[in-house]
Image: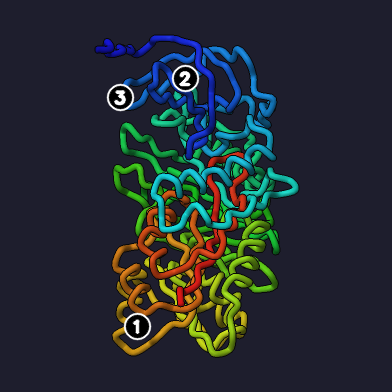
Amino acid sequence: MQNKITVKVGQRFPLTIKRLGINGEGIGYFKHKIVFVPFALPQEVITAEVTTVNQNYLNARVTKIRQASPQRVIPKDNEVFGKVGGIELEDLAYDAQLRFKTSIIKQALAKFKPQNYQNYVIKPTIGMTKPYYYRNKAQFQVKKLTNGKIIAGLYAPNSHHLIDLPHLATQSHATMQAMRTIVDIFQQIDMSIYDEKRHTGAIRTIVIREAQATHELQVTLVTHTAVLSQQERLLMMIKNRLPQVVSVMQNINPNKTSLVWGDKTKLLAGKPQIREMINNYQYDLSARAFFQLNPQQTARLYRIAANALNLTPQDNLVDAYCGVGTLGISMANAVNEVRGMDIIPEAITDANHNATINHITNAHYEVGSAEVVFDKWLRDGFRPTALIVDPPRTGLDQQLINNILKTKPAKFVYVSCNPSTLARDLVKLAPTYHVDWMQSVDMFPQTARVEVVTKLSLKK
């Protein structure tokens, strides 16, 4: 009988990295046990140091790269690479990132094994010509150091240690420039900054969104207190130094929580929304409404989804998890009727408003979860012939899947930001629907995340 291998935290050993896992971490094997190593790349030989020991796997860190991958590159954010999230693949050449993102889908399918998954058509991931400076939204925490300096940035993984970020190569230039200017204004007027330990002070988070088509900026200050000291002076300085900021909002979060947003949002200056355009459609965006972070790739994704549905004037389309109505509105002129739903009231207000400004009269949006609202529509006699879903990372609710399988819309597109939950949901959908193809789109270069458009058609 073979002796059981004992591995301890702090133990070091040579490790060859075989592939990347779904979160972008390197994967190797030590004594037949799987080892996950962040920031290690395929084909590399490293010295690994064990950080945690679990029954079925080990976590480790790189202490030395003995043999580097030919795909390893110097990250643009080299000073903070490995210290913050959102740029975990910045050390991997972009063509290799795209191949990895296609492989994530295959890994997920192999894990969940939906019906006939070996024969799915999985198209190569569509990337960007310039895979940097694409994010139209920045959301940075704010802190005052003991020496009085105010910093803004992201927390180091699994900690509340804030990393100051004067630069981030995935963010648009406009959002970063506005961010640093506002931090400078805070410093200049000695703005009250939230102290997490004492639960005192005002400014917790700065959120900046850019409408890249109109170059409008919206600033949202998430505060601990409802009253904002030096408000008039702050707003005047923002107006003078950042004329592109057309909307300043305040979101109030008085709770001792790691959640960024509070329940109440109010307008401080300018207008409550900014206007973006995607594929010649206009969208007004409120501070809390969901909108894709990469407008250039969003336009591509929407065109792929529309072509997959192949809509006709006889179709009734449901746009589930609709956000501000972007997908449904872009397809409304091709169908008889569009109905959509979302759980965020501000998003539904925006969606109905966006239908109006685009002169769309056959689209209707309601507040509520997809499973509840869809069920209500069915009881009222509505029968969809086409369906597009774009759920959060948790995937589809079981009740919504039940209703899909009951009504069987002939045309069905599933837009997913998480291949694992997509593969899980296909286990339930594949007996009824044929998976025609899966097309991934790189919405988040330099990260391990990928968006997938799946075309499904009802089996005869």
Residue that badge 3 annotates: 54
Q: Are marks 1 and 3 in contact (CB under 8 Å)?
A: no
**Residue depicted at 42% across the width and 24% down the height:** 35
| Structural crowding at the residue carrying mark 1, measured as other residues with C-alpha within 10 Å and reported as few (<14), some (14–19) or many (≥20) | few
Name the foreground residue: 27 vs 284. 27
Numbered tag placed on residue 353 in the rendering:
none
Of labels 3 and 2, the one closer to you: 3
Numbered tag placed on residue 377 in the rendering:
1
Q: Earlier in the sequence, mark 1 or mark 2?
A: 2
| Structural crowding at the residue carrying mark 2, measured as other residues with C-alpha within 10 Å and reported as few (<14), some (14–19) or many (≥20) | many
The spot of residue 57 in percent (x, y) is: 35, 26
* Image height of 436 relative to 319, above or below: above
C-alpha separation, residue under disc 3 versus residue under disc 2? 15 Å
| Structural crowding at the residue carrying mark 3, measured as other residues with C-alpha within 10 Å and reported as few (<14), some (14–19) or many (≥20) | few
Residue type for callout 2: Arg
Position of 254 compared to 314: left or right? left
C-alpha separation, residue under disc 1 versus residue under disc 3? 47 Å
Mark 2: secondary structure: strand
Name the foreground residue: 44 vs 216. 44
The answer, for residue 88, to whether it is visible in the render is: yes
Residue that badge 2 annotates: 61
Residue type for callout 3: Asn
* Image height of 335 relative to 318, above or below: below
Q: State the count of labels.
A: 3
The spot of residue 368 in percent (x, y) is: 34, 71
**Residue depicted at 41% across the width and 58% down the height:** 115
Residue type for callout 1: Trp
